[in-house]
Image (cartoon, grey):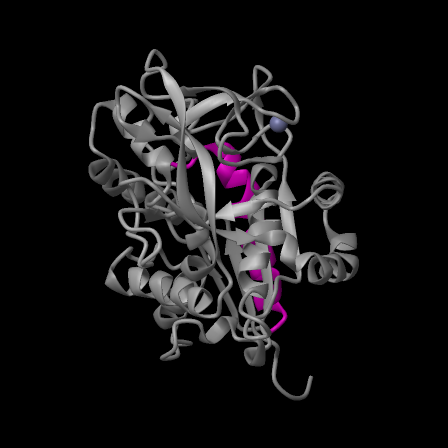
């Protein structure tokens, strides 16, 4: 072989720190990502294999309430468990990066660049609101019926069919922490990422990349493209997460899924530093001119996010960043016909856990 071995960045879906990893996580993205990273390394390629906890997810809040603890405490104990499980598996990952000031600065710089470039739009949207709690509901804080497949679903995206439900689209919404709390709708002005504006580039991207995707994920992308692409919330009237830095949305936080790309860049930078491949710029390994092979590993429930939303987040920066060469998507393990789920407290945890 002559010349430079092409670098690779392998990212496994960012685990939510609302419990340990279970066998579905381990056998899904984390093990398969590790196998691919080892394959590349055995071929002489410089590889960064990484992930990052997504502490801002609302599932941290809902699970903490169910367990009678605080979100902060749940993040701390769960992160330690997840890290122990990944270590017990013996993956190439060097650990989980700290969610610290550099992490938050990376996220804020990333969204500030997009905001300055005029990529976000201001929209007045109708949002479910728990009257007694005085809280707007999204993602893990709301459950109802998926408007696409009519199966029970949380907010954001449906685990059954993979389709998104944003804003007021979930049918018969209930506040997960207190289902007896009356849910009404209130109009709020938030910032969104208008994915429809990227349709031409998305179609071109999928034409060259989706043939390598697994059939179920490819089918979902086809279904999503067959209708107008939704606006993704960039900010939300909430209290858990990173405060949104925009003048149009005082008192709002960044919608947690918006953090995934800068979080993955930060995780890559941190992991590279641990193995002596570090650079000064946090997004160095993701720059188009670095020409890394970027591959994601995630479950079917994340096809909408990792396969579409996060792609648009990268495309929104113009030609600055590389885009993933493939999304390797695993199906769920079932337990009595239901998906294995941390939020449902299915107790088949990884080897690093204490059995309870
Ligand atoms: Zn559905």
**Magenta highlight range:** 20-44
- x, y (%) of residue 34? 53, 54
Name the residue nearer the viewer: 349 or 127. Answer: 127
- Image quarter where ligand 1 lies: top right
- x, y (%) of residue 323? 61, 65
Residue 19 seen in render: no
Label the magenta part by its dominant secondary structure: helix
Q: Residue at x 55, y 29 (%)?
A: 169
- x, y (%) of residue 159? 56, 30
- x, y (%) of residue 182? 35, 15
Does the magenta segment cover residue 21?
yes
Name the residue nearer the viewer: 244 or 248. Answer: 248
Taking 175 as reference, is 197 above or below it? below
Looking at the image, residue 25 sits to the left or right of residue 333; the answer is left
Q: Residue at x 60, y 19 (%)?
A: 151
Name the residue nearer the viewer: 11 or 142. Answer: 142
Does the magenta segment cover residue 197?
no
Residue 350 seen in render: yes
Give the number of callouts.
0
Looking at the image, residue 55 sits to the left or right of residue 37; the answer is left
Q: Quadrant of residue 322?
A: bottom right
In the image as oriented, which residue stretches furthest toward the bottom? Answer: 3
Q: Residue at x 73, y 60 (%)?
A: 200
């Amino acid at each position: 072989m002559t010349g430079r071995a092409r670098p690779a960045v392998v990212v496994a879906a960012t685990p939510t720190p609302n419990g340990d990893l279970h066998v579905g996580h381990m056998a899904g993205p984390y093990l398969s990502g590790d196998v691919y990273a080892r394959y590349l390394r055995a071929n002489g390629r410089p590889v960064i294999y990484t992930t990052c906890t997504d502490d801002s997810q609302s599932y941290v809040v809902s699970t903490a309430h169910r367990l009678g603890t605080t979100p902060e405490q749940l993040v701390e104990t769960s992160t330690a468990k997840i890290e122990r499980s990944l270590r017990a598996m013996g993956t190439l990952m060097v650990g989980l990066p700290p969610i610290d000031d550099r992490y938050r600065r990376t996220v804020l710089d990333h969204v500030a660049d997009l905001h300055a470039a005029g990529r976000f739009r201001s929209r007045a949207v109708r949002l479910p609101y728990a009257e007694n709690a005085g809280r707007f509901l999204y993602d893990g804080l709301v459950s109802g019926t998926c408007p696409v497949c009519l199966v029970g679903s949380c907010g954001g995206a449906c685990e059954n069919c993979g389709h998104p439900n944003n804003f007021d689209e979930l049918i018969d919404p209930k506040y997960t922490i207190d289902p007896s709390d009356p849910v009404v709708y209130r109009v709020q002005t938030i910032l969104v990422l208008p994915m429809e504006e990227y349709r031409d580039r998305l179609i071109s991207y999928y034409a060259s990349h989706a043939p390598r995707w697994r059939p179920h994920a490819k089918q979902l992308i086809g279904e999503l493209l067959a209708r107008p692409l939704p606006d993704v919330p960039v900010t939300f009237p909430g209290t858990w997460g990173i405060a949104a830095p925009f003048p149009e949305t005082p008192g709002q936080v960044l919608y947690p899924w918006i953090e995934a790309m800068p979080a993955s860049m930060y995780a890559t930078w941190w992991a590279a530093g641990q193995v002596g491949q570090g650079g000064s710029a946090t997004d160095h390994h993701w720059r188009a001119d670095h020409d890394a092979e970027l591959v994601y590993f995630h479950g079917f429930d994340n096809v909408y996010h990792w396969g579409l939303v996060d792609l648009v987040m990268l495309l929104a920066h113009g030609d600055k960043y590389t885009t993933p060469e493939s999304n390797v998507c695993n199906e769920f393990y079932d337990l009595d016909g239901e998906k294995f789920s941390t939020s449902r407290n299915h107790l088949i945890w990884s080897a690093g856990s204490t059995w309870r």
